[in-house]
Image: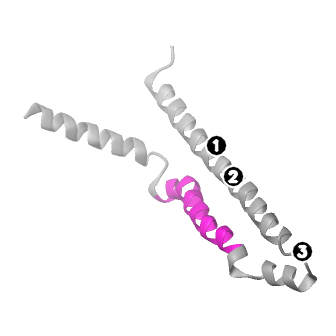
Amino acid sequence: MENKNDIFKRERAKNKVEKLKRFYSHLTVYLIINVLIMAMRLRNDLDSWDSFVSELSSFGTWSTWLVWGIILAIHAFSVFLFPLILGYDWEERKIEELMEEDLKYKRK
């Protein structure tokens, strides 16, 4: 039988793997969708080389990459850097704090 500490470590590792899976899924969808959007936009401007280059250098072509990229960067920050800043056990500390607070109010 596993002790409480092993169960706690396993849950924490499972949680981290889930967060990584969600991030990598987000990254994959980001790449696939943006490549398709860019291909469709550029395919529509294959009339001449000048129109192709003009569309390739327009802000509209790169706007989805940029806006969604910022959101993806925030997601990456929350998965990779946030735990480094607050510590890997900040979620557990916060859960314990809230549980203690809840018990304190129930006793009154």
Query: Real-space Cα distance between discs 3 and 2?
Result: 26 Å
Looking at the rendered structure, the kind of residue marked 1 is Lys
- The answer to whether 63 appears left or right of 38 in the picture is left
Residue stretch rendered in magenta on the structure:
62-85
Q: Residue at x 64, y 43 (%)?
A: 21
Residue wearing tag 2: 29
Looking at the rendered structure, the kind of residue marked 3 is Leu
Q: Is residue 58 above or below residue 41?
A: below
- Identify the residue at the far left of this view: 108
Observer-nearest of 9 and 107: 107
Give the structural element (helix, strand or loop) at label 2.
helix
Residue wearing tag 3: 46
User: Which is nearer the N-term, disc 3 or disc 2?
Assistant: 2
Q: Quadrant of residue 100?
A: top left
Give the structural element (helix, strand or loop) at label 3.
loop
Magenta segment, principal secondary structure? helix
